[in-house]
Image (cartoon, rainbow, N blue to C red):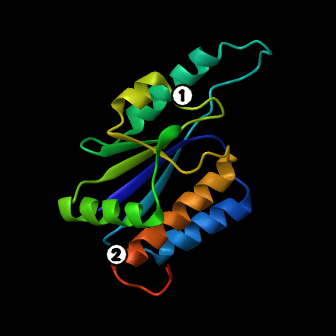
Amino acid sequence: MRITVLAVGGKMPAWVDEGVAEYGKRLPRELRLEWRDIPLAQRGKKNADVEALRDKEGLALLKAIPDGDRVLALDVRGKPWSTEQLADRLRHWQMESINTSLLIGGPDGLSQACLQRADARWSLSALTLPHPLVRVLLAEQLYRAWTITVNHPYHRA
């Protein structure tokens, strides 16, 4: 099974790339975690049309979703999941053997088209988190969820 994270944004600091790579390499071959960056729409004007920028990024995200993938939108208004609930979902996804794409919007969030395309909306936190931290947090939580599914001692509830 493959989980593809499609994230709007640019180059990340080294600590983000290192953190994401570390958790990704801990996952087994049968659960691949892939990252694809979607370019941020050009924001030059002070009074830029935020909705138009979000729509442009959303179109690029939608085009990047691999055919047949289940789609989850990371959205602050989404449903919060505990780590154990994520593990249950991950176990289910693996049993179904359906690849999954996770969408992370730009600084203005996800477009309505992305939210409508999503099979579910997931909130990592009610807090506003910086995009670099979201990437590391997401990679760690996916790894932690997997450890729960295989009774690995990494997760100690």
Mark sitting on residue 78: none
Tell which residue pokes out farthest to the right in this image. 46
Q: Which residue is mark 2?
A: 149
Report helix, strand or loop for mark 1: helix
Q: Residues within 10 Å of mark 2 (few under 14, many from 20)?
A: some
- Residue 110: image x %, image y %? 52, 31
- Residue 136: image x %, image y %? 61, 61
100 with respect to 55 (left or right): left
79 up-or-down from 35: above or below: above
Query: Relative to the observer, which residue lies in front, 126 or 2?
Result: 126
Report the amino acid beneath label 1.
Answer: Glu
Between disc 2 and disc 1, whose residue precedes?
1
Q: Which quadrant of the view contains residue 38?
A: top right
43 with respect to 51 (left or right): right
97 up-or-down from 9: above or below: below
Whole-Å distance between the Cαs marked 2 and 1? 34 Å
Q: Quadrant of the N terminus?
A: bottom left
Query: Relative to the observer, which residue lies in front, 83 or 48?
Result: 83
Report the amino acid beneath label 2.
Answer: Thr
Tell which residue pokes out farthest to the front in this image. 157
Mark sitting on residue 57: 1
